[in-house]
Each structure stands twice: as C-alpha cells, then as structure tokens.
Image: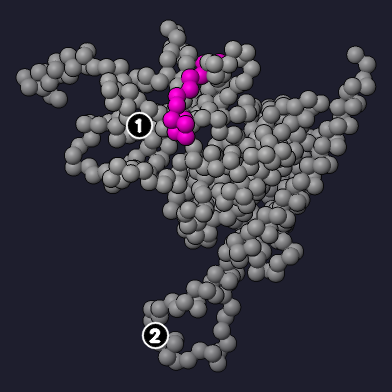
Amino acid sequence: MDVMEPNGRKEIVALLVNMAYCEEDQLGYDPTIRLYEDGGVKEIDVYDQESRKTHTYQCIEPIMLATRNFGRHTRCFLCVDCRDKSGEKKVVVKDAWAYATRKKDGNSTVDVRDEVVIMRKIRDKLAGNKELEGKCATLVHGGVVQIIKGDIVEEDNTDTAFGMLLPPSLSSEKREFRAHRRMAMTPDCVPLQNVDHVDQLIVAAADIMNVHTAIAKTCNILHRDISVNNMLITKLPENKVRGVLIDFDCAKDISKVDCKTRPERTGTYPYMSINNLLMSNVKHTQLDDWESLIYVLCWLGTTDVNPADEERYDRAKRREINKWQGTEPEDVATSKRDKLSTADLFVSDILAKFLKLPGYSRLRALVGVLYMKMFFNESHSSCFHGTITKAKPLLNEEEHSDEETSSPDLPVDQDEEQDEDARNPFKRRADYAENIADDLLKALLKEREKALGRIRKRYEKEMEAPL
C-alpha cells in the first residue's frame, strides 16, 4: 500500500475498518486460551484426539515461554484440571507449532512426526512397567488445537491460520506446514541442573537412558534429541531423584519410517552426534542418542552440574568444548570427531578439563567408561574403533596395470563403496547398535547402584547429625 497514492490511502482505511469488524480469532487471538486482565494465562483448553473431547486446565504458572515468534514457538505451563477440586493432580501443558503432514483428499495420513501419536504409543506399550514408571513424560490428553468459527470447527494449522493471506501462486507443496498441538502430560518435573550433586546426576542419567532403551526396543521409537533441556528430574524423599525423559518432538517411529538416511538435523549442536551434524548416510540408531549423552555429561562436567558449582567454571580451560557451540554444523562435527578419535586426545582435551570439585572425578570416570564402551568396545575388532574412516590400503605395484593408471575418472564400483563402508567405524558400529547400547546401559546402571549407595549413606549421616 502506497499512502502517497489515493488508492493506497483508500486501501489502508478499508483495512482498518475491516479489522474493527474482525472476530478475535481473525486478529490472531487464540480462543482456546483465556487470559487474566493483566495478560497472564488463566485457562487452557486441551483437545484429546483419542476421545474427541476437550479438557480445560487452570494455569498455575508458566514453566517455559517462547523466545521468538517463529519456529515451534513451544510454551509449557504447570496446570491443574478444572474438574479436580483438590488441585493436587498437576500436569504440564505443552503448546507448540510442530511440523506436520497435510491431510490428503480429506483422509488423514499417518503423520510420523505427530508427538501425540508417539507419546500415546509409548504410554500404552510401557503401561504396567513399574521399573520405568515416572521416568518418561506420560500423555494424559493431547491433539491438534480445535478452533470454533461460528458453526465450523477447524484444526489450527498454518493453512487455516493464514487462509486467504496465502498467495494462490504458492502451492501447498512449497509451503511450510505446521500443526498447533497441545498436550497435557505428567509428571511435574524440574530442570536437570536442580540436582544437588554428581551422584544425583548419575542416577538421573541412568533412569533416562534406561527408559530410552525400553522405548527403542519395545516401541521402535528413537528419541533423537538427548540434551540438557530434555533431561529433567523429579525430587524424591531421602535426597533421591528420578530422571525423566521429555520432548518427543524429534522422535521417529522406526517401524513406519526408514532411518537409513538423515534428511534433517535434529537436536542442539553441542549435544548432537557427529553423524547427525554431518547428515551422513550412516543409519540413525540408539548410538546417536548415547553419543549425545556423552556430550551432555562432558558439558556439565566442565561447566557445572548445578548452579552452585558455576563459580568454578573457567571458560579458557573449555576451549575445545566451547567449539561445540559453533554456528556451522560441519565445524562442530570436525571438533568432536578429532577430540574423540583417540583415547589419549579425549582424556587430555576433554576429561582433563572437568571441574576439580567433589564428585566430579566419579563423573569423569563414568564418561571415560561410556566413551570406551562406545568408541573402543573390546567386543569388536579395531575396524569398529574411533571416529575416523580408516585410510584405504595402498595397492602393491604388481596390482596396478597400465590400463588402470591411464584411465581417468574411473567409476566407483559397488565393491569399492562396500570397502569404504567397511572402513567407516560408525557404519560398522551401527550394524551392532543394540549390542553396544546394551553394554552402555549395563555400565551406566552399575554406576547408578553405586551412586544410590552413596546417596543413602549421605542421607543417613545427615539424619544422625545433631540439630
């Protein structure tokens, strides 16, 4: 609109008049969230696509607010069901605009990215497993937000939200498509760095990877985004904690999709696996998430397990790990691949930088064990070891022919590709991912039992101390 032209000024006046007659949802207000006069969230509606009913929750406080207006715009609120008069059954309501699959010809398609569907499968498959109870976010209700427009009920997504604003020339295939999903989940947790000491961190990490393994084996679902933000804890009596795995936005049901390729990067750079950063052709397995766990523990071990330890953080000593915050994924991958290529480098450039505080030596030892189980597993030969593809052995002179040396641009045959795969330690390990993951979990659970013993002794000593 050009206000210097008569038609432009006329269009602006028309726009303002039309806006004055718009319904609230047309102005961008979400009618499924009611606000207090001061702008705070009062009530949130959660539509459950399984029962096709709407449940209303009263908001107690926001847990996480979106930092920008684009992307998933994830927000989380601590709430209580409005029907619960006691107010004791708290849930976390997650509100996010996630990537989705469009419905075709009026029929629903199987949306492999649907976090609600994935969480429902996990809930149903793990139901009754007391060992894993409370160690994973559990779906209560969830689905795509439903917007009522007069007599019409529409799913809230980018197509219905933008409507006529979208230019006809922009086909649906070229448009980014997101669905506005909302879920009510339990349990109510706190961030991982609310642990009091390293032993609680070890217990939480073991709980999370235990349920992670069960989800992979029982549900055929890979989480694909192990990070500090997605590892929470629940505080328990006697100074104990329980680790809780959350956020299945990036998860994939591998029974429905092929994980042999990586069309996208998933996760946060400091914690992403090398192959995920490089979008390599190595199939995605549990080992990517175990590799991410090693990075999480390295990050906390060199920064702080909890805020009380942060004052001892020395950025200069973390020069190598700080590179994992880079903006170029290839550079981050190169840094990780180099420092993890040999045990000597990993010890000198990473483990040696752990804070010199009580308990950190145990964390350092645990990370060393996980590293060796992952990258230098004694159950497998040297071709499985390290992070760098082995150099192709040189041929003997008699194996060269004049014809071979004089023919430029020889095509790479299948045997040569297979030979390169055989020299790539990541590809070799991927073929035995479940066995290696079992070794990693066994080692982590062993350390969990030791950590629980130390927590118990510490608690008993505190109880014996005079007031």
Q: Residue at x 72, y 30 (%)?
A: 195
Q: Amino acid at mark 1?
A: Glu
Residue extending farthest to the left is: 6
Q: Position of residue 225 (x, y in %)?
A: 55, 43
In the image, 399 versus 149, the foreground residue is 149
Q: Residue at x 41, y 40 (%)?
A: 99
Residue under label 2, please give it.
Answer: 407
How packed is label 1: few (under 14 Cα within 10 Å), some, or many (20 or more)?
some
- 66 over 127 or under it: above or below: above
Q: Quadrant of the N terminus?
A: top left
Q: Earlier in the sequence, mark 2 or mark 1?
A: 1
- 463 over 205 or under it: above or below: above
What is the magenta segment's predominant secondary structure? strand
Give the alpha-carbon distance from disc 2 to disc 1, as whole Å: 61 Å
- 158 over 308 or under it: above or below: below
In the rendered structure, the answer to whether residue 208 lies left or right of residue 449 reads left
Q: Quadrant of the C terminus?
A: top right
Q: State how the image is colored.
A: one colour
Q: Which residues are magenta?
A: 48-60
Q: Amino acid at mark 2?
A: Ser
Q: Position of residue 54 (x, y in %)?
A: 45, 24
Q: Residue at x 58, y 66 (%)?
A: 424
Residue 80 appearing in the image = yes
How packed is label 2: few (under 14 Cα within 10 Å), some, or many (20 or more)?
few
**Residue 155's disc number:** 1
In the rendered image, which quarter is residue 203 located in? top right
In the image, 258 versus 270, the foreground residue is 258
Q: Is residue 272 magenta?
A: no
**Residue 390's disc number:** none
In the rendered structure, the answer to whether residue 308 lies left or right of residue 388 reads right
Q: Position of residue 233 (x, y in %)?
A: 67, 31
Residue extending farthest to the top is: 37
